[in-house]
Image (spheres, coloured by chain):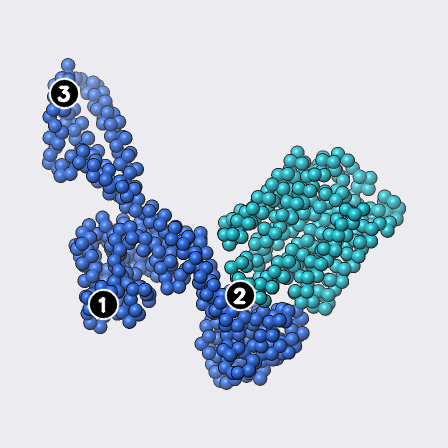
Chain colours: A cyan, B blue
Amino acid sequence: MLIGLHQFAAALYLAAGVAGGVALAQRGGRARQVALLLLSAGAVVHLASFAFLHQSVPTPQLTDLPTATSLMACLAMLFYLAFARRARWNALVLAMAPVGFLGAFVGALRLPHAAGEGALAAGAWSHAHVLLASAGLGLLALASVAGVAFLREASRLKYKGRPQLSQLPALETLDRVNLVALSVGFPLLTLGMLTGMFWLQGEAGHVWSGSPHEIWMTLAWAIYGALLLARFAAHQSARNAALSAIGGFAFLLFAVIGIGLTA
Amino acid sequence: MKLLLAGMNHRSAPVEVRERFAVEDPGLALAKLTGCAEIEEAILVSTCNRVEVLVSTREPEAARLRLESFFRHDLARDGEVSAATLDECLYHFADGPAVRHVFRVAASVDSLVVGEPQILGQMKDAYRAAVEAGACGVILNRLMTRAFSTAKRVRRETAIAERPVSVARVAVDLARQVFERFEDKRAVLVGAGEMIELALEALRGEGLGHVRVVNRTRARAEELAERFDAEAHGLDQLDALLADADVVLTCIGGDEPIIRREAMLAALRVRRGRPIFVIDIGVPRNVDPAVNEIDDVYLFDLDDLSGVAEENAEERRRETVRAEAIVAEEQQNFQGWMTALQAVPTIRDLRDRADEIRDAELDRYLARLGLDTQQKEGVEQLARSIVNKVLHAPLSRLRSEAEREEGVAYLEVARTLFGLDGRAGEGDEALPENDDDDEPEPQ
């Protein structure tokens, strides 16, 4: 059931991506609405699979890389859909659908084992850590997607690219989404790191083990803190903010996934 | 029933000819047309780019002559237009091509600026005037309704009206790609000429908030500012105003750029990263091209805007291929309906003919058989059932074939085979007596 729901979510995300491609070819219209509906359905099924996991194992193992990636993708989709509704961000469905697909697909490879591994000793802190950090990562992923879209649009306008190719929101909208995602994502990431410390305290009796994951995550957190400072205190330009969001997320991905893979 | 269309447009007639045929009171003109015996229904479309009359008629030749005369004598102003000029300018369409033309016009495929939205409203006005004048019947009502839905379909399914094609609209469209909304934005317009005015109108149409007009001659700036509820400033204040401007629009004379890179950099420092959208439609250019190299400044000159406008126009022209396919499909549907309409008299005549024969034969045989009431009812029901079953297949086939162009041949064959043409007064004699002789005598 769990794996079936994850696979179904991945299939819906994939279909949303295809519909998004058709919408791009047709320049919007009904195909984009279909893509958005499919993506919403995928996010609902994705979320349902985690609810099911929670029901079957009250404190399931979520800290392994594939499961955490899947949760992050699921939360990123939910944040995106909330933004898409408010900020007419639906043109980015083509960029978001593959993120959801990869998250659900990778999660489907691991979840049966995660479900079978049963409850964790530390319970609530590990849960809070994974949920908060994943939500933060999801939002920072969204900020970086907004950054990529901003740079593409800014470059097209600067160098007089074909307007027919543009279906993205206005630069002002992209910059605002970047700002909001960063402003909410960073505190969530901070809370995720703090709960991680409490988790470690409960497990090992100390808040800092000096593992590469902790070191790199702390560095990533510091970088994001500096970016926020540059954004709010130094009034960084929108283009630099977009570049920062992309660079910051690349670093964060390395800290979360890259270190996990090399360990 | 036939459809005829006569008219002239921006391609067939120059404006000096078209303006002589412009109609101010369509009701009066329609009354003249529908007063003629050969014209059943009529619609008159008169815009700055076209004057067209569409009629339905049972006498196409007479109606065509009447339409020519209508253009020459009733519509032409300032004296009669020569036959040669009228022949040169006037086009005629009948039936299918007339339907196609109406659908193309409504869908803005035939417009001077392909995809412009005004024509649909103008056609709706023309239709309303015809309805009010009592000049529209079943056929033109249906035709116009289909024309409007075709136009909507074309707009929905193609990009024919998506991209702007005027410089002012292109500027606004580009500004929309930078700013999400205009209500909270401030604009500085440099110059007070016609182009600035057009752009200002377009921007105000999008809800642009605060506007400042800057000009060398302050009096002209004040004049424009007064009309558009804006502020007027002299050119010497421009650099200071840039810091507070989200949109800058320039179109002013002079050999040297009036906005330089240094001034823009200074303005951006004050703006703390907020972008500036600059449109320079001056020739020679009013803004130093190096300004476009600065982050958060988006500069478009006249060539850029014209290039986009031309590209958009080309895109619209490409979309006409898809629009034409929709028009052709809708035309076929409408003509199917028109042809099916022709089947109605034949189907009715055939049914009447069969009922007459059945009733006559029942009268003839029931009198001889001496049946009681119940038996008579049974025989009558039997006869009705046989007639219905025999007619079911040919009538169904006639109905379905009638929706196609070739269906007319089926209708003609049916009328000939069943002797339906001129059958009034022929009664039962339309069927040969031999048929009766072959039947066995009732016992």
Q: CA distance from mark 1 to mark 3?
A: 69 Å
Q: Amino acid at mark 1?
A: Thr
Residue furthest to the right in view is A205
Q: Is residue B26 visible?
A: no
| Between discs 2 and 3, the one toward the N terminus | 2
Left or right of residue A169: residue B50 = left
> Which residue appears at 22% of the width and 20% of the height?
B378
Label ID, residue B85: 1
- The image quarter containing residue A113 is top right
Q: Is residue B6 left or right of residue A41?
A: left
Q: Tell me, for residue B174, which label it has, or none.
A: 2
Instruction: Name the spot of residue B371 as percent of width and height, x first.
Output: 16, 17
Pointer 1 chain: B
Percent coordinates x, y for residue A196 in the rendering: 80, 49
Q: Residue at x 45, y 76 (%)?
A: B194
Q: Are discs 2 and 3 both within one chain?
A: yes
Q: Secondary structure at mark 1?
A: helix
Q: Residue A212: horizontal and vertical position, in percent? A: 82, 51
Dividing the picture into quadrants, the one containing residue B353 is top left
Q: Nearer the viewer, residue B378 or A218?
A: A218
Which SS class for mark 3? helix
Q: Which mark is residue A101?
A: none
Cβ atoms under marks 2 and 1 closer than 8 Å: no
Position of B151 with respect to B95 (left or right) is right
Mark 3 closeness class: few <14, some 14–19, many ≥20 residues within 10 Å? few
Does the residue at mark 1 contact the one at mark 3 (Cβ under 8 Å)?
no
Question: Residue A21 at what x, y percent from top left?
Answer: 55, 49
Measure the alpha-carbon separation of dots 2 and 1.
45 Å
Using the image, determine if residue A82 lies above or below residue B374.
below
Task: Give the distance between the C-alpha atoms of the residues marked 2 and 3, in whole angstroms.
Answer: 86 Å
- The amino acid type, in three-letter code, at marker 2 is Leu
